Every structure is written in C-alpha cells, then in structure tokens.
Amino acid sequence: MESNKAEIIDEQILKNLSPKDCLLAYKQVLEFSNNLEAAALLLAENNFHGIAISNLIISNEEAIKAFMLFLEGNDFGLRTIPGFASIFDNHRLRYLVALLMVVADILMEDFKKYCLLFFQNPKEIIEFLSLEPAEIVERFKNYLKSRFSTIKTEIDWFSKIDNARQMGFYSNSFSYSDKQINSMKITKEDFEIFKNKIIRINSGINEFLKYLDGDSELQQKQLSFFRDSFRDKGVIYKEIGEVLNTIKYPNYDSYGSLHQFLEELYNKAQETKPEEFYDQITKGKTELISKMEKLEKPIEKMKKAVKRKPKEQ
C-alpha cells in the first residue's frame, strides 16, 4: 500500500485493503490526526481560533478512521457490516461515533468513581446495598435522570459540530449553541471548549490503540477478548448496518432520533414500578454483599501497604 493512500481511503480502497495494510494505514492516519491536532494548537496560539477549531474537529475524524482501521487490521470483521465504509466518506457518521465515545467515557468515569469509592470505603457500598429495594430503585432512577440530562447536552453539542468544522474556512456567520457567531470573531474561550472535549476523545483513542497494539501475551489476550466479544455478536453487526444505512442520508435527523430514544428510555425507566425488581435486587444484593464483605480485609491490607513508608536504606 502506498503511503499517501492513508489520508484518502474511500470505499473502494477500504474494500481491497488486507489486514496488514489496515495496520499500516491506521498508524499513518493516526499520525496525520495527531499532526492536525498539533497544528490546531499552534493556530490557536497565533489567534486563528476559527481554523484551529476546524483542524481539531478534522483531527478527531481522522483518529476515528485510525481506530476503525486498527480494528479491521485485527480481524474484527467490521467490513461485513452493510454501510460500514460510509464512516470513511461521511462526516456525520464520524461525529456520531465521537458522540458514542463521549457517552461511553461519561459512563466509564462513573464506574471508575464507584470502584474507587469501594476501594476507599467498602462499608459505604455495603450500606447502600443494604437499603430497601424501593430506595435502591429510586436512587438508580435519579442517577439515570442526571445522566440522561448530560447525554442530551452532548447530543445538542454534536448536532451542530459540522457548522463548527466549516466555520474556520469561511468568513460568514453561522448558528451555534443557540447564538449567531461570526467565524472571524471566534474567541480563545470558544476554542478552549472544543479543545477540552476533542483532545479528550483523541487522547482516549491514542491510549486505547497504544494499549492494545503490542505483542505481549497480556495485550494479545485483551485484544482477543475484545475481538471475540464483537464477532460473536452477529446480530449486533446486522443492527449496526441497518442504523448506518438509515442515518447516512443528509435529510435524516439522527440527533433528533437520539433525543427521542433517550426520552422513551427515560420515561420507561420512570414508569417502572420498584416492586418489579424486588426479587432480583434482594437475591443479587445478598450475593454481592457477601462477596464484598470477604474483600474488606484484603482491601484494608492493601491500603495499609500503600500507605506504609519504605524503610530507609
């Protein structure tokens, strides 16, 4: 594969790439993404904030392409999904992938927070699980409410990102975040909003690829598990294909559909009666509390070992 094809991959080229070519291309595309990000930071330093934002957005699109090529280079079989190649041709599809990554990051941060809480104070988690099922369900509903609100905000932000991508290349005004902005008057504060969000996504992709792209036994096992989790889900691939073939059309309001889906999911959760889950919660929490209580002493030993000062030489 010629080196200059990494940045111009289209449907036909993608179809003919071997897994080895995909692994070569992903590194080239990822380097291109990182260069665009670095260029955006330099442009912003010189007060070209509009074009800097455009470069940031495109750097994220290229990082997503690199991520997809890495997966294909490791036999994930994404090219069997109808419409998958559209991700390489369609800006809107790449924005949706970025949105999904942001949502996953939000949920993962919550998971890490609760894991840390358990490590620091196992009793607090055990006390929560000891609550009445109705109280557990109610707290979970409140959690969903707050998270749905956060995710809706992200959907709104990404729904206007294509305007932001184009704004650095033109001098006209455009609508963004419910206000009219002249692209020649983009401020440092505007740039910082994009920088914080997009660089976080790009960094996550870079770290993920760095973590899995290696020859160690652990890395290969993790990659194999990740791949098998995907490839065993043929039905999911079919559903993804149906979604891709629906939302790739310009007139389809994918963000509006996401809003509607969240509303329906939230309403369904709020209408759920706590007693419907009493048996599952009672059974599940009894087993979980038992396991956590067994972990209390080992965790306390680990905490003491971490705090213990090393002996002087």
Image: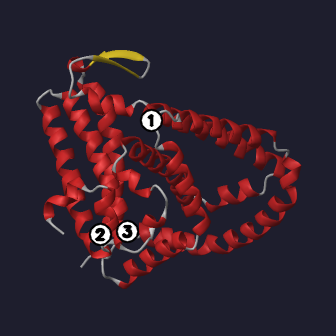
| Disc 2 to disc 3, C-alpha distance | 9 Å
Q: Kindly indicate the quadrant of the structure image that contains residue 37.
A: top left
Q: What element does badge 3 sit on?
A: helix
Query: Mark 2 or mark 3, which has the lower sequence index?
Result: 2
Q: Residue 289: x, y in percent?
A: 73, 66
Q: Is residue 140 left or right of residue 85?
A: right
Q: Which residue is mark 1?
A: 250
- State the residue lying farthest toward the front: 12
Q: Is residue 272 left or right of residue 190?
A: right
Q: What element does badge 2 sit on?
A: loop
Query: Mark 3 or mark 1, which has the lower sequence index?
Result: 3
Amino acid type at circle 2 is Leu
Q: Residues within 10 Å of mark 2 (few under 14, many from 20)?
A: some
Residue 152 can be seen, yes or no: yes
Amino acid type at circle 1 is Pro
* Residue nearest the viewer, comparing 150 with 181: 181
Quadrant showing the C terminus:
bottom left
State if disc 3 and disc 2 touch (CB < 8 Å). yes
Q: Residue 119: x, y in percent?
A: 55, 63
Q: Residue 168: x, y in percent?
A: 22, 28
* Residue nearest the viewer, comparing 106 with 85: 85
Q: Which residue is mark 3?
A: 72
Q: Residues within 10 Å of mark 1 (few under 14, many from 20)?
A: few
Q: Is residue 218 left or right of residue 313?
A: right
- Name the mark on residue 219: none
Residue at screen point 74% across, 71% down:
290
Q: Which residue is mark 2?
A: 17
Residue at screen point 59% across, 37% down:
257
State if disc 1 and disc 2 touch (CB < 8 Å). no
